[in-house]
Image: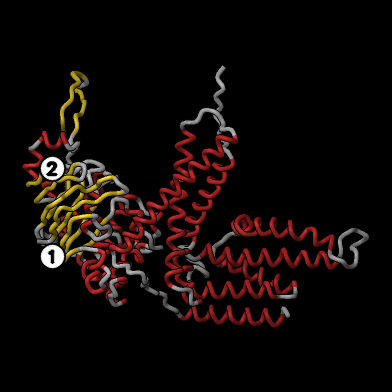
Amino acid sequence: MSDFHPSTRGGFLENTLQGLHSAMERALSAETAAENNGVLQSLDARVKVAGLLAMVITAALSAKLRVTGAILILAVLLAALSRISLRTLAARAWLGALVFSGLIAIPAVFLTPGAAVLGSPMTVQGIRAGSFLVLRAVTAATLIFLLGYTTPWSHILKALRIFRVPVVFVLILGMTIRYIVLLLETAHDLFQSRSSRRVNRPTPAENRRLAITSSGVLLTKSLHLSGEVYQAMVSRGFRGEVYLLDDFEMRARDWIAAGAFATLAAASLLLGR
Amino acid sequence: MLFQLENLTYQYEGVTAIDDLSLAIPEGSRVALLGANGSGKSTLLRLLDGLIYAQSGTIRFCGAEISDEHLLDDVFALAFRRSVGIVFQNPDVQLFNPTVFDEVAFGPLQLRWGKDDVRDRVDQILDRLRIDHLRNRVPQRLSGGEKKRVALASVLVLDPAVLLLDEPTAALDPRSQSEMIDLMIEWSGGEKSVITATHDLGGLEIIADQCFVLDAGKLVAEGRPADILANVDLLRQTNLIHAQRHGHRGRMFHSHSHLHPISLN
């Protein structure tokens, strides 16, 4: 009898790669979302980067739960105005933040010294500390998700320039994102081509061997690619210093949004002390 | 002479890619570098663009030697980069900026053009190559044909006197191949120099007035496209044509050498 297994399940590596590939496709769908007409989509990227990061910092600095909660409600409101559904928000931002911060917060609920809650091992102070952690994590994840989902990453990179990030760093960051996507596609093709010729499920040892050989192939390809990209840059006049266009233009609504973000951040800082 | 090559030799880690090559390319000419894979065409284009340097021999561009030392000089390097543009075979290596607009603007910005001039020039070239609708697109969301067009736009924006093309129609569908050739013809207008490395003989007489045939890094023949195409022994010897097995009305299978013609608008 043949031991052929038409398995659709891959090993750890293939699953990881599949996950990365899905993340890449999500990143591309974020590009599409950034083109939708909505409040955040219509704002200058610099205002969004500065404004949303300021809100993240104030949420982290706030010592009052209700202030952090108010920032979260505001973020959800901004999402609704930017045509982002609660479902998307929950799946892409809240789930991960809740799981990771929850795992850290649960021990604090029991271990923090304080008054016991209804005779249970939980303490009021522990619940409060845990809630702070989870709420801050969820709020920060929501705000960062809003930035990434409503702004093409090319604009986020350019907006970094207002924080005096050197232009060469911005260029390298952009190229890194660009070529990670390309190499991920190559890796995906590599594994698919291997899967198409595979009959049995690979053993762990085979998987390890494949991981090593694939890493070698990808490294060689990336080295070759980087050499060619450098040549392409030199051929168009790159001489070690980079010059880029800053083509942002602040309109009235951007100034209003910048003012609103500044006011909210200041108010949150004052009220959250 | 636009390019004058004398006894050029280039080796990649001990493997000879260009072997004692001497040739001359006059100004305003349209040249095809013909050869099978691994014949040294792409290496030669990189040597002509001053991206790599030969171990021995010299290359002159309009009388000035193309060398590492000369290209360290800002004035010479910027003038040379302004005059000679190269379109790589793999457009992905050429599309390293976040958007199509940024990609096309990259060259003029590095050559220190004024920002308003850059914006105007980029708008013009995007319009001319009919890719204006792609201006805010990220490179990974472009099709193969669109990537080639953007790569071409990123070089044509500089309006170079010499255009080096490495397999410009490779991996394109027939319509995109035809459009690519139309674009090259339209751009050169009979005044610019276009040097195309290719193993595709279809449309050769349209893209070139002069051909150089390379085999294992050596120049094995040169001449007008019609003469090269008529030399079947040479084409077979250099792997530019092959025997194709086919049948007539499903019967009588036989094989003979043939070209792959390209349909042009």
- Quickly name the residue at label 2: B220
Residue A172, image x, y percentages: 44, 64
What distance separates the C-alpha of mark 2 from that of mark 1? 25 Å
User: For the residue labelled by badge 1, is the local secondary structure a helix, a strand or a loop?
Assistant: loop
Residue at left 7%, top 43%? B226
Quarter occupied by residue A262: bottom right
Instruction: Please say whether residue A91 is visible from this viewpoint.
Output: yes
Q: Residue at x 33, y 50 (%)?
A: B144
Q: Residue A256 placed where, x, y %?
A: 52, 81
Q: Amino acid at mark 2?
A: Val
In-image side of B179 versus A58 (left or right): left
Count of marks, rendered view: 2
Q: Residue at x 43, y 58 (%)?
A: A178
Could you say which is closer to the camera, residue B198 or residue A134?
B198
**Residue B128 visible in the shown view:** no
In the displayed structure, B209 sits above or below A143; it is above
Name of the residue lying farthest toward the right = A119
Vertical placement of residue B103 versus B241, above or below: below
Mark 1 Cα-neighbour bin, 10 Å: few <14, some 14–19, many ≥20: few
Q: Give the left or right position of residue B178, taking residue A106 as reference.
A: left
Q: Position of residue B87 (x, y in %)?
A: 26, 56
- Mark 1: which amino acid? Cys
Kindly identify which residue carries mark 1: B62
Quadrant location of the N terminus of chain A? top right
Say what secondary structure mark 2 lies in.
Answer: strand
Image coordinates for residue B138, horizontal then vertical, percent: 40, 59
